[in-house]
Structures are given as C-alpha cells and as structure tokens.
Image (spheres, rainbow, N blue to C red):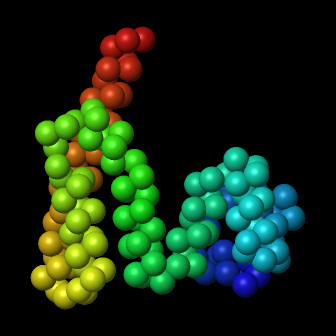
Amino acid sequence: MRVTKNWLVKHNACNDGMFFVTEHKLIGTDECYFIRQLVKLDKHDWALWLLVRRLDRKDCIRFAVYCAKDVSPIYEAEYPNDDRPRKAIEAAETCMKSNTKKNRDAARVAAWAAARAAWAAARAADAAWAAAR
C-alpha cells in the first residue's frame, strides 16, 4: 500500500505529522519504506500510529498484548503486588481465543483497571521527580 495524503487525512493524521511527512517527501511511498524512514528519523510514535492502522482488530490486540508482555516485568518489579496489568493481558488473550461478549467485557474491565494502575504509577513518578528537583 502507498501512503497517500488522502489516506492520512482519512485516518486523522495530525497537522504536525502531515507537515513532517510532506517535508520529508514520504507521501506516496510504500508503507514499509514509510515506517522505516519514520523510525530512522526517530518518529517511533508516528511509525506505531501507522502500523496499528494497518492491522485488523485481532492483530491489533495481539500486538498490544505483545507490547504489554514486553514491558510488564518493569512494572512488576516496581509494583510486585499489583497484578492488574497481568490480569488485563490474560483477559485479552482469553478474548482472542474466544471472542464472546463476556470475554470482551472482562477484558475491557481488566484493561481499565490496569490503565488506572499505570496512571497512578505515572503520577507517583512525576511527583517523585518534581520533589527531587
């Protein structure tokens, strides 16, 4: 697939992103080249933005689970008694195996709990950094 201006507009690319890819002559390039160039230019978040828009729902969930598993040891080392992120990962995996309303609801609740835990951890880190300053 070629990444066109119309495709970016359709997928709500931000103005900064549109300007950047136009300035770097990435409009009209194939998506693999596009992503490689974004990574090379240290725009990893934009490369990820494009990548997840090219995945179907199931692959998007798989990718999210992969990313969560990759960083969960960091969280678990800091918060060993908080199993909410692990439960969210497990709920998402269950939902991938059996996409029922019950499993989707359980995954949604677990993800919300994990997000609250991560938000609280981030705020605590911000407060510690501010205090150290």
Work out whether 30 lies above or below 100: above
Q: Nearer the viewer, residue 85 or 109?
A: 85
**Left or right: where 8 falls relative to 55:** right
Q: Would residue 112 be visible to someone looking at this image?
A: no
Give the side of residue 7 with respect to residue 111, left or right. Answer: right
- The answer to whether 54 appears left or right of 113 in the picture is right
Task: Depth check: give the residue in front, 26 or 48.
Answer: 48
Work out whether residue 61 can be spotted. yes
Q: Residue at x 32, y 20 (%)?
A: 128
Residue at 28% across, 72% down = 93
Dividing the picture into quadrants, the one containing residue 37 is bottom right
On the image, the x and y values in percent for residue 32 come to: 73, 72
Residue 120 is situated, as x and y percent measured from the top left of the image, at 24, 39
62 in relation to 88, above or below: below
- Against 80, residue 27 (above or below) is below
In this view, the residue in front, 97 or 114, is: 97
- In front of the other: 46 or 5: 46
Query: Which residue is painted at 23% across and 86% down in the image?
Result: 98
Q: Quadrant of the N terminus?
A: bottom right
> What is the quadrant of residue 2 in the picture?
bottom right
The x and y percentages for residue 82 are 16, 43
In the rendered image, which quarter is residue 26 located in?
bottom right
